[in-house]
Image (cartoon, rainbow, N blue to C red):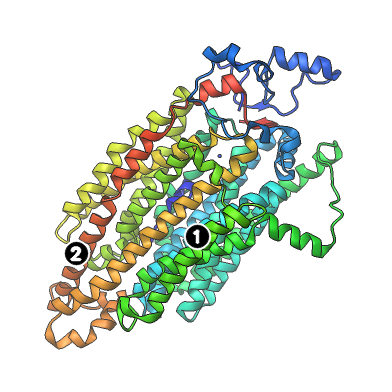
Amino acid sequence: MKDTMAEMGARNHGDPFYRLSSLSDDPVFRSGGRPRCIRADPASNSAAMAAHSINGSSPSNHGEDPEKHAAAIDTNDGYEISDDADSTQHKQEGVKQVEAITTVFSKKLLIVMFILLYLVSFIDALGQSVGDSLAPYVTSSFGQHGLLTTASLIARIIGGVISLTIAKVIDIWGRCEGFVVMVIITIIGEILKAVSHDVETYAAGTTLYWVGHIGMNYVITIMLADMTTLKNRLIIFGIQGTPGIATVFAGSRIADLFYHHANFRWGFGAFAIILAAFAVPVCVVFVWAQRKASKQGLIQKRNSGRTAWESTKYYFVEFDVIGMFLTVFGFVLLLLPFSLTGYAPYGWRTPYIIAMFILGGVLLAAFVVWERFFAPVQYFPFKYLKDRTILAACGLYGIMFLSIFCWDAYYGSYLQVVHGLSITTANYVLNGLSLASMFIGPFVGLFIAKTGAVKWAAIIGIPFVVLGTVLLVEYRKPSTPVGLLVLFQILNGLGDGIWTPVAQLAIMASVPHQQVAVGLALFGLFGSIGSAIGNAIAGALWNNILPQKLEEFLPADVKNRTAEIFGSIEVQQSFPFGTPERDAIVAAYGDVQRKLVIAGSAFLPLAIVFIFVWKNINVKRLESTHGTQTKGTIF
């Protein structure tokens, strides 16, 4: 019921990403890619580039013996994975295309593009906030409130796994093409949720929505990375996440108005229309810039010479469709039973639950074998995990989401049922985490721009997360004042708002431009899997413990209504405070919520260990040594 830090990372959220001529004289906007001095013959160009690296040009020491400059190069700096892949001849068409597009950008057009992407993020964040606020009532309208995490679990797994495919799409075809596809999928998902009359249709809509939502925010993140230097990137990322500061309040209120004065269907349908309207200008700017770059000869159209059938086979192999499906279905079948056991006739002994577990494990094992021995093009970039910074940054993101979603999945329902808060007020509390995360984002960017210290920024976030989560073990109970719960949300939000962008930057600083998209896709995959596992744990505890506790605590005359009460938040709220029935429901909620918090807290030590595994990368020193990662007119 909250923004995922897949989202917080891509949006914030996500939300959800380099070369200086002189650190002492660093213009905010630079026209890189083709340095202004490169207008003469190749020999003079090379001499000019060696004499003065400006605006995305290659530094002079790249072609020299590295041992002669060992003292000048920090061994903890990044760009360690296949620098060759970032050379012009190795770049894929989508990367070449975006570098050509940013080359024809003016400073004013660059600012316009930032604003347009910001508006799309604002509408998307607002629509997500409204949808999350309405979700418990949608599932309750089908009498299956406990399946709240099930639809979310499937959606997040698919959304995370598909990001690796999206990375290939935008690297091969282009950023604009990927953006359009993701917007369309998001809109279709919203429409399906709007017209749903059963939980299956709603789950399908939710899955499509999350695939599109995660994918769209991911593509926006890559676009912003294409238009910024490492040193200043988190400033833009932080600003891009600030729409949530407004949508935290507006989304809950809008959801309340839709629920009481219209219906939840218009809450989804309206944002399908609005998102389309705000996405069109982004596409117009990209298409215009692409045509301008083509006229200048910066983009060369290439004819593959393949027939339609040959192209189908080519992309089937290139996107490793077999590997993708093995991953998606493997994780879904392995994790889904945790949320379904409460509805299964024999619980964990139900044959189809056992079969799902076994088949999920077999598919994941088959995926490893396929990727290792048979895949012509590997879907999962295993080579990236050989770099300890990339592996640990991805691990931090996954564990962070795992922890959050253990105790957050049913938190909105808890606030409404136990503390009697309205939809609006409950979501103010719930989104306090996102609010704090978005607020701190630009300041994290300024800290990095000033110091360049990536690892130390992550260390600063540790006490916020530890205090915010561990204290919940003691205070997540019905007698705790709501104000204290808000404080814990803010502490967690500050910590997560530091960890997420800094972990993204650690990955981006470890790879060249060609591989930024795949690196961040891998990052998002870990976040989605972490949130899915957290959802699975929460769903397992909720669907197995809450019915038992309701059966135990409810008065004898209503025990026969246990299933009905468990299945609907509206039925739970229909009993007034002070009645034996409401007291029993509150006690049952309190018991299961405490267990959820304990489960989430147990993973935090591993997250902290991951931070200390990182290399001590300093992006200011990295850029002064190796140059800017991106090309063209950039921030």
514 left or right, relative to 23 = right
Query: Where does the image place residue 425, in percent across and percent down from the top left?
Result: 31, 59
| Quarter residue 392 falls in | top left
Name the residue that disc number 2 marks.
590
Residue 314 relative to residue 319: left or right: right
Q: Quadrant of the C terminus?
A: top right
At horizontal 22% and vertical 60% (from top left) the residue drawn is 595
Above or below, comparing residue 202 to residue 75 in the picture: below
Q: Quadrant of the N terminus?
A: bottom left
Label 1, secondary structure: give it.
helix
Name the amino acid, label 2. Answer: Gly
User: Crowding at label 2, few (<14), some or many (≥20) Cα neighbours within 10 Å?
Assistant: many
Q: Position of residue 203 (x, y in %)?
A: 48, 72
Which circle marks residue 127 in the picture? 1
In the rendered image of this protein, does residue 552 appear above or below residue 316? below
Hey, what amino acid is under mark 1? Gly
Picture layout, residue 160 above or below residue 576: above
Total tally of numbered discs in the picture: 2
Q: Quadrant of residue 81?
A: top right
Specify whether residue 433 is in view: yes
Pick the residue in front: 561 or 265: 561
CA–CA distance between discs 2 and 1? 30 Å
> Left or right: where does residue 407 sit relative to residue 502?
left
